[in-house]
Amino acid sequence: MRHRKSGRKLGRSTSHRRALFRNMVTSLLEYERIETTDAKAKDLRRVAERMITLGKRGDLHARRTALRTIQSKGITAKVFGELAERFRDRPGGYTRVMKLRTRVGDAAPISIIELVDRPESGTEGSADAS
């Protein structure tokens, strides 16, 4: 029985799963929006929110803790600078998971995970053009 066990195994070993989430959280914090399977997005949410909370703390121990997970010093600087200021007044809930479609090959549910209050870029279509 799996009672009181949190998280999914995703068919991977512990080290593979940890490496997967380190790569994904680094990409999410760099691009602020990534597309992945629904299960991975839901588990990634925990890791990403923890990194932003560390960025809001801002002390040396928090920075070193974040560097254990985030694989780039530049992205860590972004978390502790730009993202910490953007989410300063928000008590949590820094990410949003939106279901997108099912993948053609294996019918896996695909979702978009993105940071809330993300500045809109000009690459996406403008919905308010009449």
Image (spheres, rainbow, N blue to C red):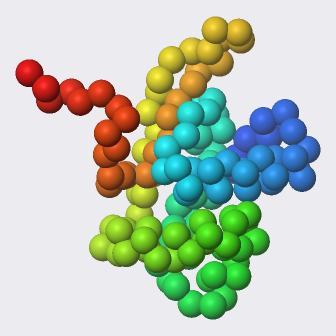
- Give the left or right position of residue 95, taking residue 22 as reference: left
Residue 73's image quarter?
bottom right
Task: Residue 69: give x, y in percent of width and height.
Answer: 72, 65
Quarter of the figure with the N terminus: top right
Residue at position x 70%, y 78% from top?
65
Q: Residue furthest left?
A: 130
Residue at position x 63%, y 90% from top?
60
Q: How many marks?
A: 0
- Give the left or right position of residue 10, taking residue 81 as reference: right
- Rendered view: 7 above or below 130: below
Quarter of the figure with the C terminus: top left
26 vs 10, nearest the viewer: 26
Task: Residue 98: give x, y in percent of width and height.
Answer: 44, 33
- Rendered view: 110 above or below 93: above
53 vs 120, nearest the viewer: 120
Task: Residue 128: give x, y in percent of width and height.
Answer: 14, 29
- Rendered view: 118 above or below 65: above
- Rendered view: 127 above or below 1: above
Residue 110's image quarter?
top right
- Give the left or right position of residue 36, taking residue 106 as reference: left
Q: Is residue 27 visible?
A: yes
Residue 75's image quarter?
bottom right
Q: Residue furthest front?
A: 122
Q: Is residue 46 visible?
A: no
- Give the left or right position of residue 88, taking residue 63 as reference: left
Q: Residue furthest bottom?
A: 60
Residue at position x 67%, y 48% from top?
24
